[in-house]
């Protein structure tokens, strides 16, 4: 169905990329220790935003050129790149640093021992 494909490529794809960019930049920065690797965090952000901007530049040139011949193919190319990015993210999952969620505090410091019961109930 061409209408469903057009809807997906013109609405869902930009929505998905906007959500992914806002989550991935923070997730990537949290892979580094905030005090011991602060210079690596800065390098990460520079590389991340440089990659985003190069991708936007290439996409802004390639998509309109290909769209002159085939619109579906033009928007399928960025979608394929996004799928490759998701696949690379999933393949790297075992190497990521993941913190347990802290439901009882607005700070990022861990809850002191004895403040949580076995099922997560706060004993305050």
Image (cartoon, rainbow, N blue to C red):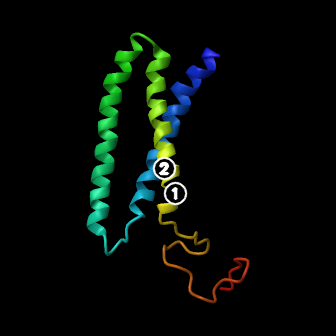
Residue assigned mark 2:
89
The quarter of the picture where residue 40 lies is bottom left
Task: Give the farthest residue toward the top.
Answer: 69
SS assignment at label 1 = helix
In which quadrant will I find the C terminus? Answer: bottom right
Q: Which residue is mark 1?
A: 93
Residue 54 as seen in the image, left or right of residue 80? left
Q: Residues within 10 Å of mark 1 (few under 14, many from 20)?
A: few
Badge 2 density bin: few <14, some 14–19, many ≥20, Cα 10 Å: few
> Furthest residue to the bottom?
114
Q: Would residue 112 appear left or right of 45 to someone viewing this image?
A: right
| Picture coordinates of residue 28, whole percent (x, y) | 41, 57
Q: Are marks 1 and 2 in contact (CB under 8 Å)?
A: yes
Residue 70 in picture, x, y percent from top left:
45, 12
In this rendered view, identify the residue nearer to me: 123 or 72: 72
Write the residue at 56% across / 86% down. Answer: 112
Residue that sits furthest to the right in the current view: 119
**In this rendering, is residue 29 above or below 85?**
below
């Amino acid at each position: 169905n061409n209408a469903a494909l057009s809807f997906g490529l013109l609405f869902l794809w930009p929505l998905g990329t906007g959500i992914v960019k806002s989550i991935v930049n923070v997730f990537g920065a949290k892979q580094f220790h905030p005090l011991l690797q602060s210079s690596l965090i800065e390098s990460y952000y520079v590389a991340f935003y440089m990659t985003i901007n190069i991708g936007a530049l290439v996409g802004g040139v390639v998509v309109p050129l290909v769209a002159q011949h085939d619109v579906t193919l033009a928007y399928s190319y960025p979608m394929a790149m996004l799928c490759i990015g998701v696949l690379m993210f999933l393949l790297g999952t075992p190497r990521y640093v993941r913190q347990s969620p802290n439901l009882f505090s607005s700070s990022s410091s861990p809850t002191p021992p004895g403040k949580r019961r076995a099922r997560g109930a706060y004993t305050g």
